[in-house]
Image (cartoon, rainbow, N blue to C red):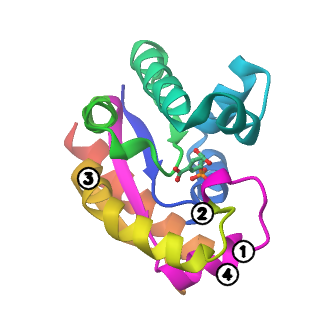
Amino acid sequence: MGNVILIGFMGCGKSTVGLRLSYRLRRTIIDTDREIEKEEHRTISEIFAADGEAYFRDRETAILRKLRQSANNQIISVGGGLPVRKENRALLHELGQVFYLRAEGGTIYERVKDDKTRPLLQVDDPLKKIETLIEERDPCYRESADVVITVDGKSFSQILDEIEAHVNERDKTI
Ligand code: S3P
């Protein structure tokens, strides 16, 4: 195990932080969305359109179960809705040290407003949807997390420094 896991709402920076962290810590990175797309040979939008959200959620749990068997000392970035399922929260804890990248709705909106690849945000009022979902999900993210990192107004290098300090601290105690 010993993985570093990044959770948080769509657009909070998991993918970019994950990639940069993988260079800094010299660990490989896995992104659950990309794993699902590879296995299904189709995009997240296509999966949602053809088979619906429930099917996608089952695929997320399947990926986590698989990672529990195979992932060691990796960076794992997970889809924004993955921690909502209770079983997934337990699996995340088993996989390693979980970081919740927490962002305000306004920060998220600015980053994702022109993005067409996130099916849940293709609605008339995406900011309202973002704020409602964040409110619903924040308790799930907190329950999943070992560390909460507030990202609003911070540079990527600040965020990486914070994560790295926690990872080093944990490594010392193991
Ligand atoms: C989702 C987040 C997306 C992707 C899917 C659903 C969500 O991942 O898994 O569109 O429910 O928040 P990102 O958080 O990487 O955008």
Identify the residue under disc 1: 113
Of residues 34 and 4, the one nearer the viewer is 34
Circle 4 packing at 10 Å, graded few (<14), some (14-19), many (20+), is few
Foreground tag (4 vs 2): 4
Q: Tell me: residue 104, above or below residue 80.
A: below
* Residues shaded magenta: 95-120
Q: Tell me: residue 84, above or below residue 99.
A: above
Identify the residue under disc 2: 13
Quadrant of the rendered image containing residue 41: top right
**Pointer 4 and pointer 2: residues touching (CB < 8 Å)?**
no
- What's the CA distance linking mark 4 and mark 3? 27 Å
Foreground tag (1 vs 4): 1
Q: Tell me: residue 81, above or below residue 125.
A: above
Q: Earlier in the sequence, mark 1 or mark 3?
A: 1
Give the residue type that dot 2 points to.
Answer: Gly
**Pointer 2 and pointer 3: residues touching (CB < 8 Å)?**
no
How many circles with numbers are drawn on the protein?
A: 4
- What's the CA distance linking mark 1 and mark 4? 6 Å
Magenta span contains residue 13: no
> Taking 53 as reference, is 150 left or right?
left
Of residues 84 and 2, the one nearer the viewer is 84
Give the residue type that dot 3 points to.
Answer: Asp
Of residues 39 and 101, the one nearer the viewer is 39
Residue 110: image x %, image y %?
67, 81
Q: Which mark is residue 110?
A: 4
Q: Which residue is at 71% across, 20% downward?
A: 40
Q: Earlier in the sequence, mark 4 or mark 2?
A: 2
Give the residue type that dot 1 points to.
Answer: Lys
- What's the CA distance linking mark 4 and mark 2? 12 Å
Circle 3 packing at 10 Å, graded few (<14), some (14-19), many (20+), is some
Identify the residue under disc 3: 146
